Image (cartoon, rainbow, N blue to C red):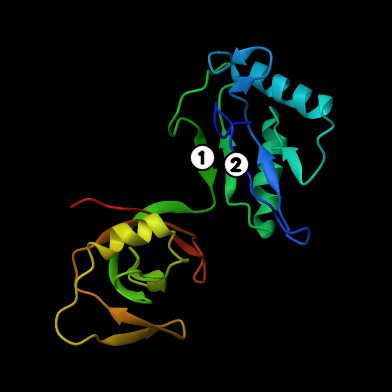
Amino acid sequence: MSRSAHGFACGPVSESANLRASAWDILLHPELGDVRARPYDMRRALLLDLLHEYDVQPPIQAVPMTDDPDVAMAWYQQLREQGVEGIVCKPATSVFRAGRVWKKIRHAETVEADVVGYTGPATRPRSLAVRLPDGRIALTQALKAPLAAQVAARLATSGPVRTKHTGGETYSVSDPGVVVEVLAGTTRHAVVTVTRLRST
């Protein structure tokens, strides 16, 4: 319901597929039309009413929401083991605006990292080897196709391809000069995810 004001189409899905969808906002109401100018607490109520009216059940459900700071902190601390990276906050009276207007409180923060290598072909890297601010070399999570294409256009190697190892994995060494923004956890073995390519 928040994906697009014009809706979207879905193809066939295997019955065995483990799919889940979380509805966090509503932009276009079937009766009221465009509701982006209404405050979030009103949009939230409209969303819940629609899910109830159409008897929507899991695996489709509304994202949990609370206005109790203690409950929010409990979620922040307890859901980390389930892979939830943090919580998102927004004023209840705020209208919808595209872009990063929500306040994110995460167990990991974005930092800049130098790209020192890659896995897979240079024309379509699967993941990157990056040097984090503390000096550690880490392999990132798999790159999404658009980001991989952007990185491939910037990767450069001099002479024969050299390989190195980190964390038991092998990567091809690239020339310096490429910087990415990554979401990196604070523990030694935390997952590192590339969020975007930094311009130079």
Q: Which residue is mark 2?
A: 87
Residues 162 and 152: in front is: 152
In x, y percent, where is residue 189? Answer: 52, 71
In x, y percent, where is residue 23? Answer: 67, 36
In x, y percent, where is residue 90? Answer: 56, 27
Q: Give the number of the disc on residue 199.
A: none
Where, by quadrant of the figure, is residue 69 drawn? top right
Image-based side of 92 in relation to 154, left or right: right
In x, y percent, where is residue 133? Answer: 33, 63
Image-based side of 87 in relation to 123, left or right: right
Q: Give the number of the disc on residue 104.
A: 1
The residue positioned 40% from the left and 72% from the top of the image is 138
Q: Earlier in the sequence, mark 2 or mark 1?
A: 2
Q: Vertical placement of 162 versus 190: above or below? A: below
Crowding around mark 2 (Cα neighbors within 10 Å: few <14, some 14 to 19, many 20+) is some
The residue positioned 46% from the left and 30% from the top of the image is 101
Where, by quadrant of the figure, is residue 51 drawn? top right
Identify the secondary structure beneath mark 2.
strand
User: Do the residues bearing badges 2 and 1 touch, measured as CB atoms within 8 Å?
Assistant: yes
The residue positioned 77% from the left and 62% from the top of the image is 16
Asked if residue 113 can be seen in this view, the reply is: no
Three-letter amino acid code at disc 1? Lys
Three-letter amino acid code at disc 2? Ile
